[in-house]
Structure formats: C-alpha cells, structure tokens
Amino acid sequence: MTWVVWSSFVIICTANIITPGPAILNTVRRAIQLGFQRVLPTIFGNALGLFTAGLLCAGGVASFVMTSEFLWNLFRWLGIAYLGWLGLKLIFRTERIETNAEPAVDIPGRVLFAEAFLLAVTNPKAILFYVALFPQVLNPQDAVLPQALVLVLTYCGISILSLSSYSALATALRSRFITQERYRLFRIVSGVTLLGLTLRLVRDMK
C-alpha cells in the first residue's frame, strides 16, 4: 500500500466520518449532558467498536456473514433494532444535564463506553464501508494483516478526532445556550432522527 493509496483512504474516511450519523448524535448528546471530559468513554467506545468491526472484515468474518443471507439479515436486523431502541430511549427517557447549579449526573464510564461500542459494532453501514474499500486499497502482494491494521487504526483515529471536535464544540456551547428544556428538545429531535434512519433501513431490507 502506497502513500497515495493511504492518502486517498484518509480523504474518503474523513468525508464519511464527519457526516452526522448515530455516533455523532450520541456523542454530542452526551457532551451536552456531561461535558467534554466525561464523554471520553463514549468517544473511545465508538473507536473500539469500529476497530473490532474493521478486524472482523479484515479477517473475512464479515465477508462470510454476507455470503449467508440469513446471517447477514440477522446482523442487519440487530443493528436496526438497536438504533430503534436508542431512538425511543432518547424520546421517552428523561435525563438531567450537569450545570454549575446542579449536582453531577451519575453515569458510569463503562455505561457510556458500552453504549457507544454497541452502536458502532452493530452498524451495518460501517461494515459495508470496510468491505467496500478494503479490496480497493489492500495490496494482495503484501501481508494483509499489517495493511488492515494501518487502515483500521487510521479510520479509528479520524473518528476520535471527529467526535472530539464535535464534543468540544458542544461543551463550549452548552454553558451559554443549553438549558434542561433545550436539552430535552435536542434529545427528542435526535431520537426522531434515529427513528427516521431506522425506518429507512427497514425499508431497504424489503
């Protein structure tokens, strides 16, 4: 794999990652609620989910699943179900935000980490992105695993930078503009957005 190929991969990944999606919505929501430092488990949970999905693709597991219509549909339905559940939770569950006047919101880091990890690893679009690009950029004349590690780590690194930027911006804005009521409205809009994505994925399954 040459520097030109890797640079092209970086450009494509960046365009894909910075486009708002479930991971960005979830991270921004948590950043508004908790602040930048406490949202770090969410950022790294997402990165580990992407890393796991990337290694599965590199190892051929995802390709094997995609050759079985039953297994691939099962995997897609699991991802759709999780997105739908998260959307409904955003709409109907009440959450406080941390402010100077309010005590700290008690959400363990492991909960934030697991939430983001599951969201990343069950997202069929991430798997499809890896499966679509890996054959285009991997050089079969060289060892596949080292190349795959470079590509997956690159993808995860860009994701960390993207989510960190979104989180920092959300944290900077929340002290001036975010109230409990506005946070509630943001959660509802985010939940409706995720449900819309869920319905679109369900439609694509038909």
Image (spheres, rainbow, N blue to C red):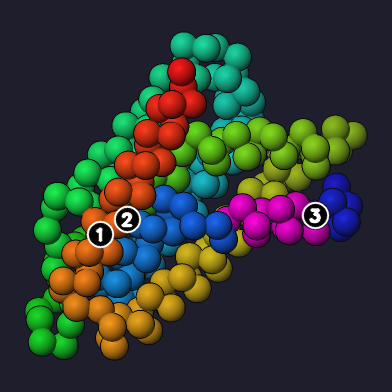
Task: Please tell me the numbered disc located at residue 200.
Answer: none
Question: Alpha-carbon distance for marks 2 and 1?
Answer: 5 Å
Query: Looking at the rendering, which quadrant does residue 41 occupy?
Result: bottom left
Q: Are marks 3 and 1 in contact (CB under 8 Å)?
A: no
Answer few, some or many: residues within 10 Å of disc 2's Cα (few below 14, many 20 plus, some between 14 and 19): many
Q: Secondary structure at mark 1?
A: helix
What is the span of residues highlighted in magenta in the rendered image?
Answer: 7-17
Answer few, some or many: residues within 10 Å of disc 1's Cα (few below 14, many 20 plus, some between 14 and 19): many
Disc on the earlier residue, 3 or 1:
3
Name the amino acid type tagged 2.
Answer: Ser
- Residue 112: image location, x then y, percent: 29, 57
Q: What residue does disc 1 label?
A: 187
Answer few, some or many: residues within 10 Å of disc 3's Cα (few below 14, many 20 plus, some between 14 and 19): few
Q: What residue does disc 3 label?
A: 8
Task: Please tell me the numbered disc located at residue 190.
Answer: 2
Residue drawn at (25%, 59%) of the image: 187
Query: Do we see residue 58 in this rendering?
Result: no
Q: Is 66 rendered above or below residue 3?
A: above
- Residue 159: image location, x then y, percent: 55, 59
Q: Is 59 rendered above or below residue 89?
A: above
Name the residue nearer the viewer: 23 or 42: 23
Disc on the earlier residue, 2 or 3:
3
Nearest-to-viewer mark from 2 and 3:
2
Residue drawn at (36%, 28%) of the image: 78
Q: Is 150 rendered above or below residue 166?
A: above
Q: Would residue 34 appear left or right of 150 to someone viewing this image?
A: left
Q: Secondary structure at mark 2?
A: helix
